[in-house]
Image (cartoon, rainbow, N blue to C red):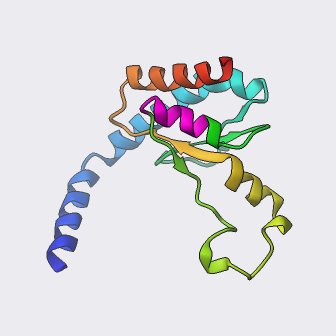
């Protein structure tokens, strides 16, 4: 097991050499997604991420929240089109919290659990990849 940890550490250290470039590319990708998905946010179909000017993000993933419907229609559509999605970290429905509180007492967390998901913003995505993601999301809303 020690070898695995040492190997992972070596890979992580190698990536640290390029961390500023990686984060800059992820920010570029997130800004591009936000700019091109803005019409769907303006129409009240999807909530886009917002970062206050006094904060920043490394954009490990790009969060989206469906407005007016649950996430599964969009997630399934994206997955069928070859675009991976991930559920947002569920806050209130983790098994370790079972029986500790009622999820309905936390309506925003419940809404995020039901409607929020992530798509990629990885630094290796090309503009063609991002355009494909945007076009696929656009097609979903047009259907």
* Residue most extreme to the left: 3
Quadrant that contains the C terminus: top right
Q: Is residue 47 left or right of residue 75?
A: right
Residue range in magenta is 74-82
In this view of the protein, can residue 75 be seen by the observer?
Answer: yes
In this view of the protein, can residue 30 be seen by the observer?
Answer: no
Q: Residue 78 lies in magenta, yes or no?
A: yes
Q: Residue 95 lies in magenta, yes or no?
A: no
Seen in the picture, residue 93 relative to 52 is either above or below; the reply is below
The count of marks equals: 0
Q: Is residue 72 left or right of residue 8?
A: right
- Find residue 73 and report its horizontal and vertical position in percent: 63, 37
Quadrant that contains the N terminus: bottom left
- Find residue 56 and report its horizontal and vertical position in percent: 56, 47
Front residue of 115/54: it is 115
* Residue at x-position 23% and y-position 66%: 9
* Residue at x-position 67% and y-position 78%: 97
């Amino acid at each position: 097991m020690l070898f695995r940890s040492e190997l992972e550490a070596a890979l992580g250290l190698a990536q640290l050499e390029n961390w500023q470039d990686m984060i800059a590319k992820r920010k570029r990708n997130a800004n591009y997604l936000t700019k091109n998905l803005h019409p769907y946010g303006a129409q009240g179909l999807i909530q886009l991420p917002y970062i206050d000017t006094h904060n920043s993000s490394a954009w490990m993933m790009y969060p989206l929240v469906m407005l007016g419907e649950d996430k599964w229609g969009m997630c399934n559509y994206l997955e069928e089109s070859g675009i991976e999605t991930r559920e947002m970290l569920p806050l209130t429905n983790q098994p370790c919290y079972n029986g500790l509180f009622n999820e309905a007492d936390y309506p925003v967390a419940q809404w995020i659990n039901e409607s929020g998901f992530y798509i990629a913003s990885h630094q290796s995505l090309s503009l063609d990849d991002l355009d494909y993601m945007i076009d696929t999301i656009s097609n979903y809303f047009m259907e």
